[in-house]
Amino acid sequence: MSQKILAHVEASSLKPEVAKFNIGDTVDVHTRILEGDKERIQIFNGLVIARSGTGSREMFTVRRIVAGEGVERKFPLHSPKIAKIEVKRSGVVRRAKLYYLRDRVGKATRLREKRDEIATEGAAKKPARKKAATKA
Amino acid sequence: MAPGLYFAGETTMAATGAAPAVRAEKAGRKGLLGRKIGMTQVFDADGTVVPVTVIEAGPCPILSVRSVARDGYSAVQIGFLDKPRRLASRSLRGQVANLDGKRAKSRAEAGVPVAPKADCEPQRLVREMRGVYEGVEIGQMLTVDLFDGVDFVDVTGTTKGRGTAGVMKRHGFKGQRASHGVKKVHRHQGGTGMNTSPARVFKGKRMAGRYGNERSTMRNLKLVRIDKENNLLLVRGAIPGPQGSYVMVRQTNKLKRVGVGAPASKKKAGGK
């Protein structure tokens, strides 16, 4: 019963629709930023290395390399501050958490690109096939 | 809910001269009994994550109203959660409704007035809230509507029982060193006092023992949301006790943050 009530409370925080993306995808996260009273969109581009939590508490971690330094940002999936999540390319991965990428530098951080989008992915549009762009 | 419920504005003096040591009876605070459901998080207006505890509060029937004239103090008695009649004792059933019986019959014959009862199901949890409440009547149902316009609440509950706990957990002692000759006493306290003078341990010395399972109040919790449909209150932060434990939620009377939501007891709370 308690869990049902909690789920009901959390349902109010859920977005009706969230972008579909997987571990190993390179994404653009469009975040709303308030500057004074003006709102603007900032894009954080990087590789999704983890998803955690369930329901309204679900979070995902995006990693990118900025000026030779690894930067990770963790976003609440259902945060109203996230305007959009765009999948740029999908990598082939065999685990749910890509923490091993933290120990790798340079070329070793590349992931093989997913060739065939599985039909059941449905809404996820086919990413433009680029030549193994390495890091974001 | 029934209209006309409001709470006494200022402190009212106990008017009965008969009672010895007439003390000022304070105005009652809005309050409900409830059950801790658990914690989760919600997003506020600007998208910030707010950690909240969900409390199922009310509906609470008013079972009795205490007055200085009759009882020597002021309070309301409220209940929470119905208890099946087959499980409730006769006294519990008699608390909420007038029961038939030999005694009731003889009292009626003698012309003793029948005490008003809430006429509801027996209640699992019954508590009194001290203070003068005006415009309340027995049998009235209090719901989360009560907290309309209330910004901060105090939540009283029973903390999780820890059983016998050492001094580090119970009192936050630092324990002893991991090395440098310390043997098997890493989580012990150190000395408990002095030497031949006073040659005893002072009373009240904090030591290991029973910890938890005691009444505790978290004050000044922000009331984040009221879900009237499901009788839910969402308060910011944690409250005492395990999930499913009973709590009492009251409008705070200790407001730290100035400017926001002064307690309604200071305002003229004019009912609904």
Image: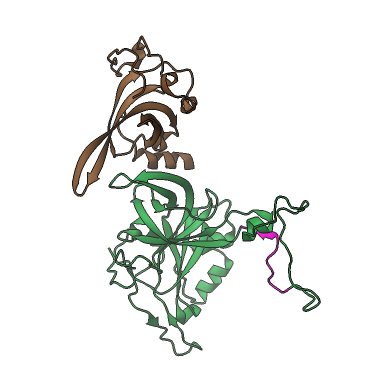
Whether residue B143 is visible to the viewer of this picture, yes or no, is no
Residue at x 30% of width, y 13% of height: A130
Name the residue at 35% across, 9% down: A116
> Is residue B204 rendered magenta in the image?
yes
Query: Which chain, by letter, is green?
Result: B
* Viewer-side residue, A116 vs B67: A116
In the rendering, what colour is chain A?
brown
Q: Residue at x 45, y 77 (%)?
A: B67
B124 with respect to B152 (left or right): right
**B55 over B66 or under it: above or below:** above
Name the quadrant containing residue A62: top left
First to last magenta residue range? B202-212
Residue B50 position in % (x across, y down): 38, 48
Above or below: residue A96 compared with residue B104: above
- Is B142 located above or below residue A86 in the figure? below
A132 or B243, nearer to the observer: A132
Main SS of residues in magenta: loop
